[in-house]
Image (tube, rainbow, N blue to C red):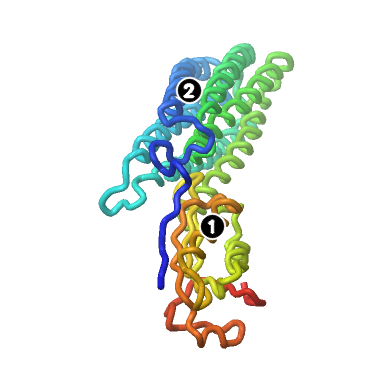
């Protein structure tokens, strides 16, 4: 007797996928569009002022704002794609378009950081004349614009790695403007032109940190790794602790897209147990204890010979190529 079923949270995936805190997809797009308008408008002004002031910090901020705008555009496109229903060969739909967007955001932060670090080192060696007053005034205006843009994106659903990627771009740009304002003030008061390049290097460190985090998290999803907060071995031991479960194997935990963990496993139960009741109990445990509502459990009765083998043995009749450890309610390898 076999029981296999997909379990979904009440309300499931209908019309509100991946939004854990009640922000609608249309609201997300509206907030992102407002932030995009603010960023793009100010970026055009900053490029002109940066060239006039000969400030690498301002030009780097403008370049960063360009990546901010691109990241928001990618986020908006990814939201549209992710909202499309599953069909044909795309059995999960295009939900991972959001993760592609997040990874692109992380990569652009890393690449831009490398370029700015190179330019900053050159300016440390041979600093140009910098108009401190223009730098300071523009940076202060940039701080205001980025605070407004960051506030807009914070109103969207940041549990989405896609939205978080755009938010990290804006937040790093805000830090960049703060650093640029400090550098402009130093140049204005002391004529120490290298302060401009030093501020750029500080911002580069922040960009690399944020970019690495986005690439790492998106990479885990693409490589089908378990979510960082879920330990498959712990989950397997928890499932096999059910009174009638004798073994759990082929246990897989992965993330479909941001905030949507999924699990599948082959579960063997006592010959007299009700497979469907056990499956429902395990699904309830996974949902309540681990927040996993998308589950596929194949539940079978354990053959008599399996109940008699020693710990660590495996019944080849069930799975010719088992993946991962075999969980039993006794000492076993992990």
Distance, label 2 to label 1, CA atoms, is 33 Å
Q: Position of residue 308 (x, y in %)?
A: 57, 87
Q: Secondary structure at mark 2?
A: helix
Q: Is residue 219 visible?
A: no
User: Badge 2: how crowded within 10 Å, few (<14), some, or many (20+)?
Assistant: many
Q: Taking 230 as reference, is 326 above or below it?
A: below
Residue, x 45% and y 47% (percent of image)?
A: 257
Q: Position of residue 160 (x, y in %)?
A: 50, 39
Q: Position of residue 328 (x, y in %)?
A: 60, 75
Disc 1 marks which residue?
Answer: 226
User: Badge 1: how crowded within 10 Å, few (<14), some, or many (20+)?
Assistant: some
Front-most of residues 45 and 217: 217
* Front of the two marks 2 and 1: 1
Q: Secondary structure at mark 1?
A: loop
User: Which picture quadrant has residue 326?
Assistant: bottom right
Q: Taking 50 as reference, is 245 above or below it?
A: below
* Tags 2 and 1 touching, CB below 8 Å: no
Q: Position of residue 249 (x, y in %)?
A: 51, 72
The C terminus, quarter of image: bottom right
Number of numbered callouts drawn? 2
Q: Taking 334 as reference, is 118 above or below it?
A: above
For residue 250, the mark is none
Residue, x 31% and y 47% (percent of image)?
A: 86
Disc 2 marks which residue?
Answer: 35
Q: Taking 96 as reference, is 195 above or below it?
A: above
* Dot placed on the residue nearer the N-terminal end, 2 or 1: 2
On screen, residue 26 versus residue 278, left or right, reads left
Q: Is residue 240 visible?
A: yes
On screen, residue 199 versus residue 5, left or right, reads right
On screen, residue 126 versus residue 35, left or right, reads right
User: Which picture quadrant has residue 14?
Assistant: top left
Residue, x 50% and y 78% (percent of image)?
A: 271
């Amino acid at each position: 007797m076999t029981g296999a079923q997909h379990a979904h949270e009440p309300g499931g995936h209908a019309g509100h996928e991946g939004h854990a805190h009640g922000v609608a997809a249309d609201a997300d797009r509206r907030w992102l569009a407002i932030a995009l308008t603010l960023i793009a408008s100010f970026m055009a002004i900053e490029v002109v002022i940066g060239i006039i002031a000969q400030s690498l910090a301002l030009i780097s901020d403008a370049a960063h704002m360009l990546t901010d705008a691109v990241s928001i555009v990618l986020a908006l496109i990814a939201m549209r794609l992710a909202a499309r229903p599953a069909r044909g060969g795309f059995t999960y739909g295009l939900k991972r378009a959001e993760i592609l967007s997040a990874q692109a955001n992380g990569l652009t932060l890393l690449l831009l950081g490398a370029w700015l670090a190179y330019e900053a080192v050159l300016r440390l060696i041979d600093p140009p004349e910098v108009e401190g007053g223009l730098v300071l005034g523009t940076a202060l205006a940039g701080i205001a614009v980025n605070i407004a843009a960051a506030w807009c994106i914070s109103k969207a659903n940041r549990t989405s790695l896609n939205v978080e990627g755009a938010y990290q771009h804006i937040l790093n740009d805000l830090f960049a403007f703060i650093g640029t304002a400090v550098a402009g003030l130093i140049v204005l008061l002391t004529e120490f032109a290298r302060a401009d390049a030093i501020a750029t290097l500080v911002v580069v460190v922040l960009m690399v940190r944020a970019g690495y985090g986005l690439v790492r998290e998106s990479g885990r999803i693409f490589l089908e790794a378990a979510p960082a907060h879920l330990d498959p071995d712990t989950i397997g031991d928890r499932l096999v602790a059910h009174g009638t479960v004798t073994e759990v194997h082929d246990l897989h935990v992965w993330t479909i897209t941001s905030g949507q963990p999924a699990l599948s496993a082959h579960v063997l139960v006592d010959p007299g147990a009700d497979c469907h009741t056990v499956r429902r109990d395990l699904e309830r445990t996974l949902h309540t204890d681990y927040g996993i509502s998308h589950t596929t459990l194949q539940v079978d009765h354990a053959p008599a010979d399996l109940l008699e083998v020693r710990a660590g043995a495996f019944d080849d009749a069930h799975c010719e190529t088992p993946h991962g450890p075999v969980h039993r309610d006794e000492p076993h390898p992990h």
